[in-house]
Amino acid sequence: MAPEVLVGQEAVDDLLEVLDLEQIDSDLFRGREAAKAGTQRAFGGQVAGQALIAAGRTVAPGRNVHSLHGYFVRPGDSERPIVYEVENIRDGRSFSVRRTVAKQRGKTIFFMSASFHVGEKGMEHSDPGPLDEVPAPEDVPTLPERLKTHPERLGIWSRVPRPIDVRYVGTSGFAPRGDRPAENRQRVWMKADGKLPDDPLIHACVLTYASDLTLLDTVLNRHGEVWGRGGYLGTSLDHAMWFHKPVRADEWILYDSDSPVASHGRGLAQGSFYDADGGHLATAMQEGLLRRAPDEVPPGVP
């Protein structure tokens, strides 16, 4: 019998355990060996979130992450621990910069640069979020509800813990091929499906984790394409985020994204995060490798 999939607060607590790295030395951390349920390949958002936790644990209190830039260089194995080495690049009067290298079997699978800032008074402006163009999150079906007539299309979403409540305003890349119209924008409501502790670093790491769930899907959205059989397989190549305001990842956030260009097998997607009042919380960009799925796709792919 397949293991029960964790959802709700249990799934959130599981994610918090994943982010709770073991500190081996002042600048050396180790992640949990394996998730309770998952695929063989480590999820990129998890690796990025753990790398940010490792960096943040070496920074003085009061300095919050304002940007990160990471590269995925090898696939990670979810059944083996990941070691995170943190290099202190600089500690200034108001900024701290760290570089985190994630390794398995002695080889780098991911590296990230992250900058932390104490925050200062200055100019402030932001364009409001498009909340008047989307229904409230409570009125948007969950992904399992959308795909209840096509449960086989849930793919890995039906096999791994679901700590993030993801609600596509439109059609997702897990829809059956032919059921997804081509659209220029993708809008998704999301939040942690439970309560998080009041630690700004945890909320930034959970948003980093969540940002990787749907962003590359935006590239397929431009062409009405889907994941898996008859569609595409994708791999994240790099990921960048900028945090503009304090984030509560356990409250509803609108992820408004688009894909300005795709070329040579790679697609670029960019997204903005807005709170329920339309405040611009953060911005993300990601480039991914997209290839036509073969007739027989790896386990876990719909």
Image: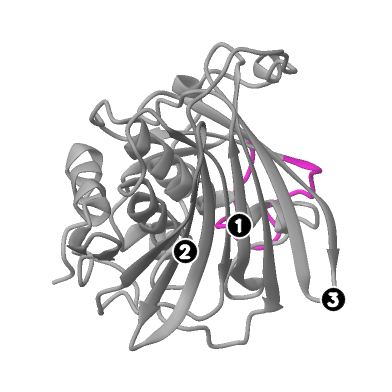
Tell me what residue is drawn at x 24 percent, y 59 percent: 26
Instruction: Determine which residue is flagged by label 3.
Output: 264
Tell me what residue is drawn at x 40 percent, y 80 percent: 299
Residue 56 versus residue 193 in the image, above or below? below
Tell me what residue is drawn at x 75 percent, y 58 percent: 268
Image location (x, y in percent) of residue 216: 64, 57
The quarter of the picture where residue 129 lies is top right
What element does badge 2 sit on? helix
Instruction: Determine which residue is flagged by label 1.
Output: 239
Q: Is residue 152 visible?
A: no
Q: How many labels were placed on the picture?
A: 3
Does residue 62 appear left or right of residue 257 in this picture? Answer: left
- Asked if marks 1 and 2 touch (Cβ < 8 Å), the reply is yes
Does residue 87 appear left or right of residue 22 in this picture? Answer: right
What element does badge 3 sit on? loop
Instruction: Determine which residue is flagged by label 2.
Output: 44
Residue 252 versus residue 161 in the image, above or below? above
Image location (x, y in percent) of residue 122: 66, 13
Q: Main secondary structure of the magenta part?
A: loop
Does residue 223 appear left or right of residue 104 in this picture? Answer: right
- Give the Cα separation between the discs numbered 2 and 3: 22 Å
Coloring scheme used: one colour
- Give the Cα separation between the discs numbered 1 and 2: 9 Å
